[in-house]
Image (cartoon, rainbow, N blue to C red):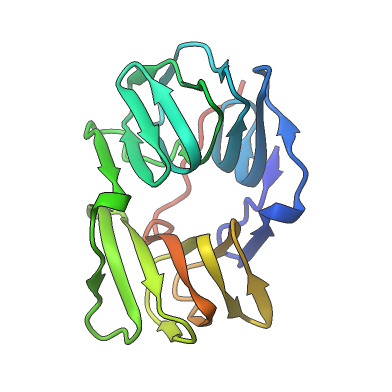
């Protein structure tokens, strides 16, 4: 299965307008943003867990990165409420679920195969810092290595936001919204720009709170082997 699998092209999904697709586990549904592969895939999705639903225990051979958009996500390591960012590296194993329901942004098979760092950050407990050279933009850093940089960005109402040079850019709207290329991006809208495609956006009247990943598309896209 291929969904927005050309990583040299601009891709957009206004996920609030996309139907939920059932997963193999009862009560777990998803909206696919990009995907390369079948059930085991390099994938970016918004996943919704109904109250009491869970996935069976499994190992993330390609790593798992997620951000809790609503509710409380859970596994053997504890509870992860709205606003929590988590990285479970390759070879990690867990049994995820949501007793009271949850929605998460999740990315699979997108790690350095040698990465073994676990990361858990409660973004609601951190204050954003102004970004030098980007007027009206502040951020909460989440993760950075030689391959990528992940953060929460906060755009002030009406701010004009540009980014000319990058090695790939991906944005999910958490709250608020913005305009880009004549399109309106609202809550849970997703934008992916290829290497060095300039971002030229204007924050909406309420500003915007965004999950942002950059500099992750310069290397060949890695996906799990298929039979």
Position of residue 224 relative to residue 211, above or below, is above
Front-lying residue, 188 or 201: 188
Q: Residue at x 21, y 35 (%)?
A: 117
Q: Residue at x 29, y 67 (%)?
A: 139
Q: What is the quadrant of residue 165 in the picture?
A: bottom left
In the displayed structure, does residue 137 sit left or right of residue 5?
left
Position of residue 131 relative to residue 64, above or below, is below
Quarter placement of the C terminus: top right
Horizontal and vertical percent position of residue 9: 61, 65
Q: What is the quadrant of residue 24 in the picture?
A: top right
Horizontal and vertical percent position of residue 93: 36, 17
Position of residue 69 relative to residue 54, above or below, is below
Q: Residue at x 48, y 41 (%)?
A: 107
Q: Count numbered badges in the picture.
A: 0
Quarter placement of the N terminus: top right
Horizontal and vertical percent position of residue 192: 54, 63
Q: Residue at x 37, y 66 (%)?
A: 153
In the displayed structure, does residue 171 sit left or right of residue 125?
right
Horizontal and vertical percent position of residue 122: 29, 44
| Residue, far top | 57
Position of residue 13 relative to residue 97, above or below, is below
In the displayed structure, does residue 50 sit left or right of residue 98?
right
């Amino acid at each position: 299965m291929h969904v927005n699998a050309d990583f040299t092209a601009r891709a957009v999904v206004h996920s609030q307008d996309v139907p939920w697709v059932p997963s193999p586990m009862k009560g777990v549904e998803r909206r696919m943003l990009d995907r390369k592969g079948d059930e085991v895939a390099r994938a970016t999705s918004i996943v919704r867990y109904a109250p009491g639903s869970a996935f069976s225990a499994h190992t993330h051979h390609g790593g798992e990165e997620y951000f809790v958009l609503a509710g409380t996500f859970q596994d053997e390591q504890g509870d992860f409420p709205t606003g929590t960012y988590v990285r479970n590296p390759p070879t990690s194993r867990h049994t995820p679920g949501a007793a009271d329901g949850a929605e998460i942004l999740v990315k699979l098979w997108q790690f350095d195969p040698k990465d073994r760092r676990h990361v858990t950050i409660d973004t609601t407990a951190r204050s954003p810092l102004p970004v030098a050279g980007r007027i009206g933009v502040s951020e909460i850093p989440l993760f950075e290595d030689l391959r990528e940089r992940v953060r929460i960005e906060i755009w002030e109402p009406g701010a004009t936001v540009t980014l000319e040079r990058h090695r790939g850019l991906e944005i999910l709207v958490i709250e608020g919204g913005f305009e880009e290329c004549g399109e309106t991006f609202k809550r849970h809208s997703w934008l992916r720009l290829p290497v060095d495609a300039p971002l030229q956006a204007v924050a909406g009247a309420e500003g915007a709170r965004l999950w942002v990943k950059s500099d992750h598309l310069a290397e060949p896209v890695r996906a799990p082997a298929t039979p």
